[in-house]
Image: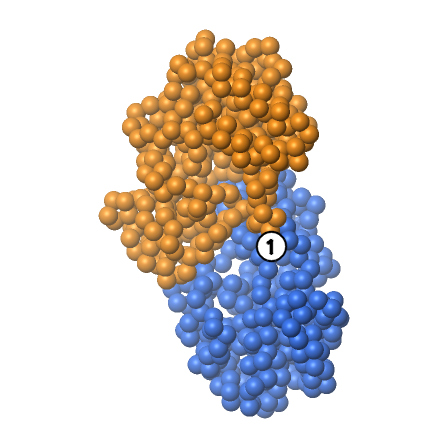
Chain colours: A orange, B blue
Amino acid sequence: MAVYTEVADDQLDAFLAEYDIGEPISCKGIAEGVENSNYLLATSRGTYILTLYEKRVDPRDLPFFLGLMDHLAARGIPCPTPVHGRDGSALRTLAGRPAAITTFLPGMWPRRITVEHCGPVGEALARLHQASAGFTLKRPNALSVSGWRPLFDGSKERASEVTPGLAEELAAELDVLERGWPQDLPAGVIHADLFQDNVFFLHEKLSGLIDFYFACNDLLAYDVAICLNAWCFEADRSFNVTKARALAGAYQRVRPLTVQERESMPLLARGAAMRFLLTRLYDWLHTPDGALVRRKNPLEYLAKLRFHRSVAGPGDYGI
Amino acid sequence: MAVYTEVADDQLDAFLAEYDIGEPISCKGIAEGVENSNYLLATSRGTYILTLYEKRVDPRDLPFFLGLMDHLAARGIPCPTPVHGRDGSALRTLAGRPAAITTFLPGMWPRRITVEHCGPVGEALARLHQASAGFTLKRPNALSVSGWRPLFDGSKERASEVTPGLAEELAAELDVLERGWPQDLPAGVIHADLFQDNVFFLHEKLSGLIDFYFACNDLLAYDVAICLNAWCFEADRSFNVTKARALAGAYQRVRPLTVQERESMPLLARGAAMRFLLTRLYDWLHTPDGALVRRKNPLEYLAKLRFHRSVAGPGDYGI
């Protein structure tokens, strides 16, 4: 829930004059997206999303993100399409921030995940992986295995404030992940953050994938592992294998996993749990008390990590 | 900036089934309104605002607020119109909260106030006062002169944390206000919170008045005094008499102030400054550090209060 940068009406008028999308009718800050300021912009031509990129987004990454959305939308993926201005550019400056306008996607993200959501998510993820194949810009994943140790180092002194023994458990886990992380699996562009609030449904059909601001080049199966973590656990932290079977099954009907990808899934799932555990832990320990941000509990991901450590093989995910 | 209550998709579907406004297409929390949870709701029929009333709103006041908006909208005031369900009721329960749907108003609230905004605000306020004349429900103003002393008592011990001598200055001011507060001026329904973020403009014309959740019965001229405070000071806390003249002049072209109302304006303006100073002071001292609310500086209203104490008469407001 976030609007960090206010946009004055005359600033907005001047900004929109660079586009061919009509006159502004309404512009309301929306309480979605933690990293950036998002406005729902209604013009005489239609409805759009106006995003101002805040500090946590590196402006040098924006051509990758916007180019990827252009690339995917042109290939039928239901993602926001950047609107290009009269000068051809989709990226300019508003209220001192990099800013872009994208198309508006209908639908709502599911507040309660059911099995019926998981198949469409798996299918959409596979189509995203296929569609991104020809995209030429590159962005390494700073939050993959090589990035976890430095992130952990920034939290380990105080990790026991969250739960006793956490630092020791994570240190041992990192050793395993760093030693065993697969290197030769199929790679490409991954979404890397396909949580429930980034997937829209309309009339029980998947209608949109949003928030490509963690997208990067990495192992495709790692993106599946992130989704297993995000979509297949219940609120009581139990794992729902029916959801996993629906998600992975639908994925594989579009893009079958290789034998190596399937065998690697338990470790990839541990890694995915580690990645979200570490960023949540860091934010938990480093967010000032007065900040206008709701911190997410890192222990949810410790429970998930322990589950993945306990599985016998890919069969436990229904793969 | 606020969404306090999340609405699940199945809850929303069941709620909307009580109305005749089509199927939901999108429902996004908006970062406006401090007291309640507001969603921008797009359906197959149009765009609406869905409001869930949070703790600070007394549910017993909701028939007054919703009835007033119905009454005003029917008389041509550009305010949100409550949408009535199939059972005729505009008020029901969603996600455990009282909830209502209102029409969507085009326009944007002005981030930078200019003289051109002030005339339309004055005119709209006068029309609102006229249009509310026949509205029969009553709601006393808990934040008028009789409510200030208890509010002050809840802050005075710690007022000097904000600025030295504040408690003494406010106590003396309260004495003056309580002794001199006018009793026999024209009264009716007032908006009581017509700040810039509650007034929309589209193509330089006033297109909407929103947020009637402080509306109540009180002196009409007191509402003018609130607007003088809200619209006619610059960011450096100086008073812009050109803005005041535009606001009060446009008001009077619709509803001329009586001699007594004009003579009372300096005191009413002091009272209006006191009212916002006291609620801001209370929130400043009582909001926990971790709260997801941005506190407003009470000292802005101390400067305004001192200005009003210094004026020679209504002429200093251009009245």
Report the side of A23 relative to A206 (left or right): left
Identify the image quadrant of residue A277: top right
Using the image as rendered, state which of residue B147 and residue B140 is in the foreground: B147
Q: Which residue ends up furthest to the top in the rendered image?
A: A259
Q: Residues within 10 Å of mark 1 (few under 14, many from 20)?
A: some
Residue at 55% over, 26% down: A274
On the image, the x and y values in percent for residue A139 come to 36, 31
Q: Nearer the viewer, residue B93 or A97?
A: A97
Which residue is most to the left? A87
User: In the rendering, at what x and y percent does residue A127 appear?
Assistant: 40, 23
Using the image, determine if residue B89 lies above or below residue B318.
above
In the rendered structure, the answer to whether residue A148 lies left or right of residue A43 reads right
Disc 1 is placed on an element classified as loop
Residue B275 location (% of width, % of height): 65, 72
Q: Quadrant of residue B73?
A: bottom right
Residue on which disc 1 sits = B293
Q: Residue at x 38, y 26 (%)?
A: A217
Q: Chain of mark 1?
A: B
Whether residue B68 appears in this view of the structure is no
Total marks in image: 1
Which amino acid does the dot numbered 1 rest on? Answer: Val
The residue lying furthest to the front in this view is A157
**Residue at x-position 55% and y-position 62%:** B210
Answer with the quarter of the image where residue A117 lies: top right
Query: Is A17 situated above or below B28?
Result: below
Residue A144 appears in the figure: yes
Q: Along the line of sight, which residue is nearer the eye, A187 or A73?
A: A187
Q: Is residue B234 above or below residue B101?
A: below
Residue drawn at 47 percent across, 17 percent down: A181
Question: Does A168 appear above or below B106?
Answer: above
